[in-house]
């Protein structure tokens, strides 16, 4: 499965990041809700320090975790990106 959306995404500059021990938490802009970064979302947060498409994110995860099933990676990464977009943690990057 590939995503036909060529939109690039990047971290929302309005998000506040807090690290406690090895855990990373983000504070959503507007609502002030705290979002815990699990291993998938933590990797995406790092990736979206630079602009990237969903397909680029999927390719990076597939390469990093070749032992995982392709459909499992697509499901997990797509779900994480959907949630991050819904919470305005990442936003569309406009060149």
Image (cartoon, grey):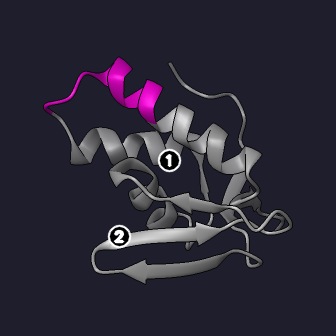
Q: Which residues are magenta?
A: 67-76
Residue 5 image position (x, y, % from top left): 72, 35
Q: Nearer the viewer, mark 2 or mark 1?
A: 2
Residue 56 left/right relative to 90:
left
Residue 93, compared with residue 72, is above or below; it is below
Along the viewing direction, whichever of 84 and 69 lies nearer the viewer: 84
Residue 73 image position (x, y, % from top left): 36, 30
**Marks 2 and 1, Cα distance to the nearest angstrom?**
25 Å
Q: Which residue is painted at 46% across and 53% down in the image?
A: 41
For disc 1, the marked residue is 56
Q: Is residue 1 visible?
A: yes
Label 2, secondary structure: give it: strand
Q: Which residue is painted at 51% across and 81% down in the image?
A: 18
Mark linked to residue 23: 2
Residue 68, compared with residue 29, is above or below; it is above
Residue 11, compared with residue 76, is above or below; it is below
Residue 25 left/right relative to 52:
left
Residue 87 image position (x, y, % from top left): 73, 52
């Amino acid at each position: 499965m590939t995503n036909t959306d060529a939109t690039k995404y990047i971290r929302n500059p309005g998000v506040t990041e807090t690290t406690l021990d090895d855990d990373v938490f983000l504070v959503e802009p507007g609502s002030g809700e705290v979002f815990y970064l699990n291993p998938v979302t933590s990797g995406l947060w790092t990736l979206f320090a630079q602009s990237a498409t969903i397909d680029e994110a999927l390719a990076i995860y597939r390469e990093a975790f070749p032992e995982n099933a392709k459909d499992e990676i697509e499901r997990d990464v797509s779900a994480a990106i959907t949630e991050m977009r819904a919470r305005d943690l990442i936003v569309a990057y406009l060149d």
